[in-house]
Image (cartoon, rainbow, N blue to C red):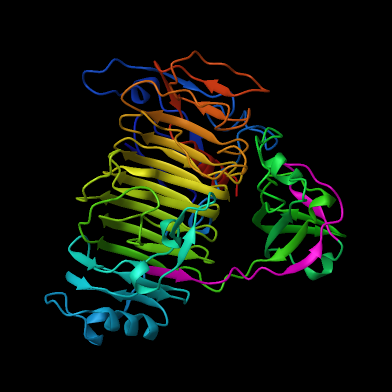
Amino acid sequence: MFAYVTKNFPVRIGGLGALVIVCGCVTKPPAATALAAEPSAPAAEVVTSALWGSEGERWLPTGRLPDFSYAGYHSGERAIPDYPPSLNVAAFGARGDDDVDDTAAFQKALAAAESGAVLVPPGRYIISDVLHITKSGVVLRGSGPETVLYFPKPLEAIAPERSATTSGRPTSNYSWAGGMIRLEGNLGSAAVTLITAPAARGEKSVVVGKAQQLAVGQWVEVFMTDTPANTLAAQLYSNDPGDVSMLKGSTKVSLVTRITKIEGNRVELERPLRFDVRPEWRPVVRTFRPTVEDSGVEDLTFEFPVTPYAGHFTEVGFNPIAFEGVANCWVRRVKFINPDSGPMVGGVFNTVSDVVFESRRPADGAGNQGHHGIYLHGGDHLFTRFDIRMKFIHDISVSETAGVVVAQGKGVDLCFDHHKRAPYEILFTDIDLGLGTRPWKSGGGGGLGKNAGARVTFWNLRAAGALPEPTKDFAPWSLNLVGVDVGRPPLLEPAGVWREILATQQVFPQNIYEAQLASRLCKR
């Protein structure tokens, strides 16, 4: 294992072929180091991708490999803080050693907290209602795995929300939303000025009508909405969208970034556009002023009752956590036991890390014990260092999102559920899929496009054997497979699916997200 530091910013890199930073520069480890294999395994040839190279020298902002380095808490530019304690739930009457409901004590503690960590001592606490975090800088912190929150009632019993699938099947809205702990806010989006000229993906500037209403250093959102003809959706599928008849102009795109320079009505942005800008999509620059930032949940175990899992769309809301309208928040060092689904993560720039999923529930006929392991929407989230020890119908789900990174994790038999509605420029890197029998198994209603959108990238995936090859219905031609064994030889096709690096070779870097982040921070 290696570690590296970019200026004063530490980033951990682990595993074979790890990156090393020397004096702030990315370097390739010497062959002897990079080839350190398991004692009985033969050394693999270390190779680099034509999309990146060894230090990013082959990367282009207009190329098919997106810049994923802005994902997660404060775009990877800050470490998640360890807040000092401010309150203790015990002071509000919570006791983790009895059969008395502790909900009111937790609710009072969170309502009283203005900042810092609300501590939960070791013990088992009964929570029978939703807990809300609606302020910035507030963290619910346990004492580790020995701090257990037990939820005997599902959300559907607490606050019923009946709904239906896109095909009309009755179900609960909690089948794909909601959580027992909710971080809730508003991203503060309000239109400031129209964008008055077209721009191309990869460019870092836009021309606006009222630049005087903007300022250098300001966080803003570039936002567009589709036409009834679904022309924006088509772009997000590299003009290879499949059936989008049911989208009906509902597609939206967003890019949150900082302003670095203003000259006349030309506004320079910190990061490249990840979509074309066209007048037909009514492009605007909006404010970005989140009401809830820098809050989190950490060092806890969430436990739900051992009830048989009855199958798809029967879920009643044994869901632990939901993020809605928040930015730069986190979940870390948490275990989920017997959930219907795991975290439901909306908003922007949020991180879920160091989490474990386990279940003792009797499975359905297909061996599933839950619905969504994690559901990521919004944008630019990071899900990393995870261990999914149970089987969900959809282990990792992405929908209506972009810039999400899933990295450094493992599972029993992982599937990467792209839930249609153009989840584009998503990265899965440095992941052990376990059995590897169903990596592309995905859901989503009819007429909502192909499952995955443009330039979805899979980089360094490992499994018990070769993975099945994605079908044309899964993703458009701009799909990237780098260091992914699908039982076929590489094919570097600029206008087709990109398959690169043999199963007998070792891709360097193993984690392209961390390599891109290190490269960007070194250049600051």
Residue drawn at point x = 40 percent, y = 66 percent: 296
Is the magenta region chiefly helix, strand or loop?
loop
Would residue 243 be counted in the magenta stretch? Answer: no
Residue 123, by quadrant, is bottom left
State the extent of the magenta-drawn residues as a range. Answer: 180-208
Q: Is residue 238 above or below residue 404?
A: above
Q: Is residue 194 above or below residue 239?
A: below
Residue positioned 44% across, 35% down in the render = 441
Residue 202 highlighted magenta (yes or no): yes
Q: Position of residue 482 (x, y in %)?
A: 50, 26
Please indicate whether residue 210 sits to the left or right of residue 357 in the image. Answer: right
Q: In the figure, residue 415 lies in which quadrant?
A: top left
Percent coordinates x, y for residue 149 in the rendering = 24, 68
Relative image position of residue 357 (x, y in whole percent): 28, 50
Give the farthest residue toward the top.
489
State whether residue 298 is above or below residue 126.
above
Question: Which of the pair 394/11 is nearer the observer?
Answer: 394
| Residue lying at the far left of the rendered structure | 97
Q: Is residue 286 visible?
A: yes
Which residue is drawn at the image coordinates 50% and 62% (left, top)?
328
Residue 10 visible in the current orientation: no
Near-viewer residue (165 or 438): 165
Number of numbered callouts drawn: 0
Lateral position of residue 149 relative to residue 288, left or right: left
Quarter containing the N terminus: top left
Q: Is 254 situated above or below 291?
A: above
At which x and y percent is residue 285? 75, 61
